[in-house]
Structure formats: structure tokens, C-alpha cells
Image (cartoon, rainbow, N blue to C red):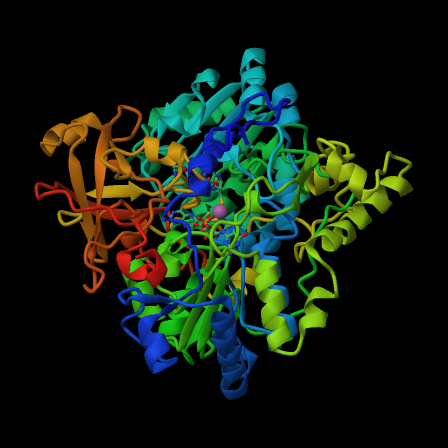
Amino acid sequence: MVDGRLEVKPHPDDPDPNQIIDNFPAALRHRARITHPMVRKGWLENGPGPDQMRGRDEFVSVSWETALDLLAAELRRVRDVAGPGGIFGGSYGWASAGRFHHAQSQIHRFLTIACGGYVGSVTSYSSGASQVLIPHIMGDYEGLTKRNVTWEQVAEHTDIVLAFGGMALKNAMVAGGGVSRHVERGAMQQAADRGCEFVLASPLRADLPDEVGATWLPCVPGSDTALMMALVHTLVVEERHDRAFLDRYTTGWPIFERYLLGETDGLPKDAEWAAPITGIAAADIVSLARRLAGKRSLMVVAHALQRAEHGEQPVWMGMVLSAALGQIGLPGGGYAYALGAIAYYGRRTNDVPIPTFPQCRNPIRDYIPVARIADMLLHPGETYRFNGETRTYPTIKLVYWAGGNPFHHHQDLNRLRQALAKLDTMVVHESAWTATARHADIVLPATMTLERQDIGASSNDPLLIPMHAVANPHGQARDDYAIFADLSERLGAGQAFTEGRTVREWLVHLYEPTRQALAENGLPAPNFDAFFESEGLVLPQKPDDGGYLRAFREAPDTHPLTTPSGRLEIYSQTIASFGEADCPGHPTWLGQPYVPSAETPYVLISNQPRTRLHSQLDFGDHSAAAKHHGREVLTMNPQDAAKDGISEGDILKLSNARGACLATVRLSEGIRGGVVQLPTGAWYDPEDPREEKPLCVHGNPNVLTRDIGTSALAQGCTGQLTTVRIERFNNPLPKLRAFEPPEEFLTPSER
Ligand SMILES: Nc1nc2c(c(=O)[nH]1)N[C@H]1C(S)=C(S)[C@@H](COP(=O)(O)OP(=O)(O)OC[C@H]3O[C@@H](n4cnc5c(=O)[nH]c(N)nc54)[C@H](O)[C@@H]3O)O[C@H]1N2
Ligand SMILES: Nc1nc2c(c(=O)[nH]1)N[C@H]1C(S)=C(S)[C@@H](COP(=O)(O)OP(=O)(O)OC[C@H]3O[C@@H](n4cnc5c(=O)[nH]c(N)nc54)[C@H](O)[C@@H]3O)O[C@H]1N2
Ligand SMILES: [Mo]
């Protein structure tokens, strides 16, 4: 703190600091922060039950005592009438960097210990399709993303990088648990200086940094599988594919090859076939295939590609392309799925455990694939397919959220509002008035990272960071831990939840396994106090050994993959056995799900925001500075704009059958024609919340996206792409209220 004002600085050793941290100073005491426990008026007056007023009602400020008494009684009621299986505690979200105050761990531990469990969720919004697919076809998902080709290897060994969806520097600014050094720009620059060629297949040129001088293939969104097939087709017909690799390390190639060559369906997947689908000239595809062959090539597939309908296909086909090139398992070569998407990829892994708050084993075995929440609430008791099983949606009475923002992460927000109306009760811990908080019945103000002590750590970053409280809690905000401790007390499980420890005592306790492992390895192992007073502790890391793919390449018989065949599965017997309707048994072009029409002529990309982490601190200075008239900025190609009579800076209305939002427009030659891009993260701000499909006046793309799974195999989120209509908005600009606690929210003393 300097003169009472918070100053934030990057780590002194960071070669390429990010500016997202500039959101902190203004956010700390912003009026969007929640100051008191609040209860929705209708819930307070009428008690729990389905209510269309959720998100449309007023709030009443209550004391902590009252809020916790009401909530404990409601949790007891739900547990008694529905059992813990009536509570949804999936509570998906990134929360904050500290490992003790990690909200997901806190809420899961609380629900397990004090409520007897909860219905949870599996997989993530990040990689819902690949997390289910990869174990069937390659093996361990974590190992593939976190212990595979590193930036060090790229800098030193790679000859050609083909990145589908790119490796945008904006994305590697962040990592769960924190990141001490941003190495991505330097590593790519070093590779380029050495002569490594970079090729970007993406509708957005900014998906690779200018420094690497990439060849840009501005492909049609959703068409990557076809592009990859045409590359492999070219390799095969020109006999440039690595037959020996395919024979030794893969299974099912002959089945796939027949499909590829058109022997099964009469349709060769060649460059001529792919050109109109992908928007990339056949000659360019053929030339690229030739440049890839016989070199240390690295295929990168961004998470984004699988956050779309049929999202499994490009991930699987990316593996097949890499296998056909024969470089998997070599330094700097093969398949680096999701490299660059988050700063904990492409790094070495730590060789000692990092602190983890124990969640305890949830006795309720029921769960949903995380992105199916609205389906679950709208269709209790109905069946759905997931990873080869037919499952039944549970009947949920109460939803409890801490550390996530479904009004950021979920698709088709107007449908989500309908789903939430079905609940008896919705509880949210939040530090700010997100739309999720506004749709809750009980809102409990939570502290921010800057207001509490913690330990920052990530399994792929060597720096263990003491996190000191630099400010007092805002208003009456409390730590999630303190809230859950008091609730546990009321539910007769106080001691079991806290184990009698204060926050400081927990930090000491959680630090101990790391300290012990350091001591056992004969390394400096400072006690907790010494660590906490230090600038941070550098942890030992495993060698850059290429992980399980390297081991498999070197000795496939003694280090088989964990797939059923022990090999890379180009054809998966397991997936085929689930049935064609779930997912075909090998990568297949299933058609383009995002076809522009007269009604919705543009394909919308809603990707990760450059100026913030998801929706977090959207009210901070750095995020605010990038908006225009307070609205999120849409990027559009100048030719498209001219055709539609749109000029730079205009206010636009984006709409489709699901909803509508406003945005301002920036014109750029760096985006493919027919495609527009609006980042995620602007807070949902309905012009008239009473309407069924109100206009979001701020620019949240999830009012437009479709709430449907990637496939019946993985049921992943499909938020990245949709189709929209765009027109100039000529009405007076509606007022922004996303960051205003409406007057009704004020306590009598504040009025
Ligand atoms: N259209 C579209 N949608 C997408 C995506 C996309 O590409 N396109 N991407 C998806 C992806 S990859 C992801 S990971 C999700 C991200 O979705 P989320 O992780 O849900 O998004 P965040 O904004 O990080 O939400 C975290 C919330 O937790 C709160 N919080 C932070 N720390 C604490 C704490 O200590 N305690 C409590 N109680 N609260 C805290 C923050 O204020 C914030 O509101 O979005 C997904 N949604
Ligand atoms: N600054 C910042 N960084 C972040 C995050 C954040 O919120 N802010 N979130 C983090 C999280 S949780 C995650 S999971 C990762 C997500 O990592 P990704 O999902 O990979 O990131 P996105 O930015 O959503 O998408 C990357 C790019 O893919 C391109 N793309 C979209 N659709 C297609 C397609 O069909 N084909 C091709 N070839 N390209 C396509 C888009 O142009 C987009 O810019 O990012 C992480 N990094
Ligand atoms: Mo994510």
C-alpha cells in the first residue's frame, strides 16, 4: 500500500509481465463489492420454493447471525426431505490463486462433512470433450497437457509448429494457482530466431504473436477436422506419412485410412474436398503437408476447438495427424494438445507436493458432466448419455456456489435463468455483485485474495508464494472458511470441519508435506514462519523428460499407454461400442455445425478475454479501459462492416433465437470475413430483468451461445462458437447497471 492506495507489481524475475493484475487496485473497494449478507425478499417472505422472481427481485440486508441461521435451517430441511443428493455442490469455477482459501475445496469439504455430501460435477468448461476422449485414445489427460512438450523443447528442437487455434499470448498470462514467469513469448521468439516455421490455422491472426512471423491460414471456424484430414490425405497419397510409426505405435490405422481415402463412403478427404469447407485453398493445404513431413513437427490444438459441437473430432484428428507425421514422443515434436492455452502447460512439473486443502470423499456418487447444469434442473429424472453410460438427472432442491460464476461460464443464459427458477433455494458466496449473486436467494459476502493470508502454488510453477493480507475485509465480508466453519458449527460438525485450526494453523499444516519432502530430498526446508516471511520458495522440478509419450516411444512394450490397446487409438473399439449416435469409432467429419444463414449470417467466436480472467474483476481499471462506452468490444472485418454499413465505434446489437446483447465494434483485417469475435467476461446486464429474453446491454456472449453438449460421448461445453445476426443499434444507449448495487440493496443505515 502506498499512501492508502494499493500498488501492484509483477514478480521482479518475470520476463513478460501481464497487465491483468492492474484490475486489482480499483476493484478492492469498488461499489460492486458485496458489503453485507443479503436475502432475496421473496424467499425471506415466502420461504424456499420455485420462483420466477429469482434475478428479478429485491434484496434485504440481514445480519450474519440471521443469514447463517436461515441457511443452516434450510440445509437441514433439504437434507431431511431430499437427502444430500438434493444439493448440487458442483460449484464450478476458477476462484482465486491461494491454495487454502480455494473456494471449490472449501465448499466441497463443507458439504461433505456438514451436509452428508452433494451431487457434484465432472470434467470442466475448459476441456470437457478432451478430458473424456483422451483417456480412450491416448491415456492420461493430465500428463498429456502438463508433462509433455515444453517451451524449452520448442525453443531448442522444433522445426515447424502448426497451431490450430494458435497459442495466443493473452491466454498464457494466467494459470490456476498463479504463475511467476511468463516464458511463452521468449520461447517462441527463440524458436523463430533459430529458423522454426510457425503456421497458424485460426480465424484470428492475433492467436500467435507477431514476433514469430507465422503463416496465417484464416480457416473457417469449426472446420479444423477437415483441414487435418486433408493434410493426412496428402501425406498418404504422396507416401510421406510415417508408416513404421503408425504400425508400431497405433491401432486402427487401416480402418481410418479406408475412410480417409473414401473407400468406405466414396468421398476422399483430400485437399480439394477440404478447400470449400475450410476456406483454405487446396494448393495451400498440399504445400503445408509437404512442409510438415520429414521434420521435427509439432501439432498444437487449442482447447477452444473442442469447446464446440463435435469438439472431440479435432482433438482426435490432431493426434492422428501427429501420428502420421511420426514425431510423437520426440523432443519438441508430436502432439502438444493445448500448449499455450494456460501458463501451466509446457512447463516442468514440481518434484515435491504443493499444499492442498483436503476436500474429503463425497459419499454421494451421483454427478453430472459439468456443462449439463441447466439440463439437470430443467429435466430431473430424465436420462442422458455420457461416456458410454445412460445416466439419470437427479432432482435438485438447493444449489450452493462458491468461487464460480455460471452467468459467466454457462451457455444460453436466458435458459439458465429458467432452470434456476425451478430451485427451492440458491446460495452464493461472492465478493462482488455478479449476475450469479443477483440470481441467488442467500448472498454471503466473501473476502478477496488481497484480504487474507494464503499460500500461492501450482504444480507446474517452481515458486511457492507467501500471500499476505494487504487490506482489511471489505464491509462485513468474511472468508469462505469462516463462513463454512460457522455453518458447520450450526449443523453440529464444527470441529470436524475446522479440525480446531485457525487459518494460520491450517497454512502451517498444509505447508508441512512440502517442507517434509524438501527435507527428505536434502534441500533447504525452511519452517513455515521463515517461508512466510520470505519472498517465496523455489521448489525443485522434475527433469524435462517428455512424460509418458517419450517413455512410450522409447519402449512401447514396457511403457504402454493406459488405453485399452496400450497404443494410440486411431480407431477406438470402446468408443465404437458406445454406438455411432454417441460418437463414431474414429475421427470423422460430421459436417459443419456453424453454418451462417440469412437470419444469422455471422459466425461468432467468444474466446477468452485479454484484459481479465474470465469475468473476474471486470469492474477493475484494466478491463474497463478496453471497453467503449462501457460496452464490450466486438472485432469485425472491415469488408463485412462496409457491406453492412457499420463503422468503427458503432454500437451494435447481436442477436439470434436465444437472446441479444449490445457491443461496440472495432474493425480489423486480422479476422476472417464472415466471422466476428466478442470475448467472454462482460457481466450479464439485462436491460429489463423481468423479460424472458432481456437485452444484455453490456456484451456477454453467453446470451447467444447454445446450451448443448459437444456430443453424447463427452457432453462438453460448446460456448466458443455460434451464429448471430448483427445490426446497428440506433436507440438511445441503455444505462449500464452491472456494477451498481441497485438502491434496494442498501441497508436502512446506508440510505
Ligand atoms: N461463451 C463461452 N463461455 C465460456 C468459455 C468460452 O470460451 N466461451 N470458456 C469457459 C471456460 S474455459 C471456463 S474455465 C469458464 C470460467 O468460468 P468461471 O471460472 O466460473 O469464471 P470466473 O469469472 O473465473 O468466476 C469465478 C468467480 O469466483 C469469484 N471468486 C473468486 N475468488 C473467490 C473466493 O475466494 N471465494 C468466493 N466465494 N468467490 C470467489 C469471482 O468473483 C468470480 O465471480 O468459462 C467458460 N465459459
Ligand atoms: N487472459 C486470459 N487468459 C486465459 C483465460 C482468461 O480468462 N483470460 N482463461 C484461461 C482458461 S480457463 C482456459 S481453459 C484457456 C482457454 O484456452 P483456449 O480455449 O484455447 O482459448 P480461447 O481464447 O477461448 O481460444 C483460442 C483461440 O481459438 C480460436 N478459435 C476459435 N474457434 C476456432 C476454430 O473452430 N478453429 C480454429 N482453428 N481456431 C478457433 C479463436 O480465434 C481463439 O482466439 O485460456 C486460459 N487463459
Ligand atoms: Mo477454462
Q: Residue at x 39, y 56 (%)?
A: 410
> Residue 751's quadrant in the figure?
bottom left
Q: Which residue is at the far front?
A: 749
Tell me if residue 400 can be seen. yes
Q: Image quadrant for the N terminus?
A: top right
Residue 664 vertical placement versus 138 (above, below): above
x, y percent for residue 368: 50, 67
742 versus 674 height, above or below: below
Is 168 positioned to the left or the right of 186 in the image?
left
Please tell me which residue lies in front, 716 or 421: 421
x 39%, y 80%: residue: 48
Q: Quadrant of residue 481?
A: bottom right
- Please state if 466 lies on the left or on the right of 676 as rendered: right
Residue 242's quadrant in the figure?
A: top right
The answer to whether residue 257 of the structure is visible from this angle is: no
Spot occupied by residue 73 in the image (x, y as percentages of width and height): 51, 80
- Percent x, y for residue 720? 37, 46
Depth order, front residue of 211/139: 211
- Image quarter where ligand 2 lies: top left
Left or right for 645, reference 71: left
| Of residues 719 and 712, the one drawn nearer to the viewer in this rendering | 719
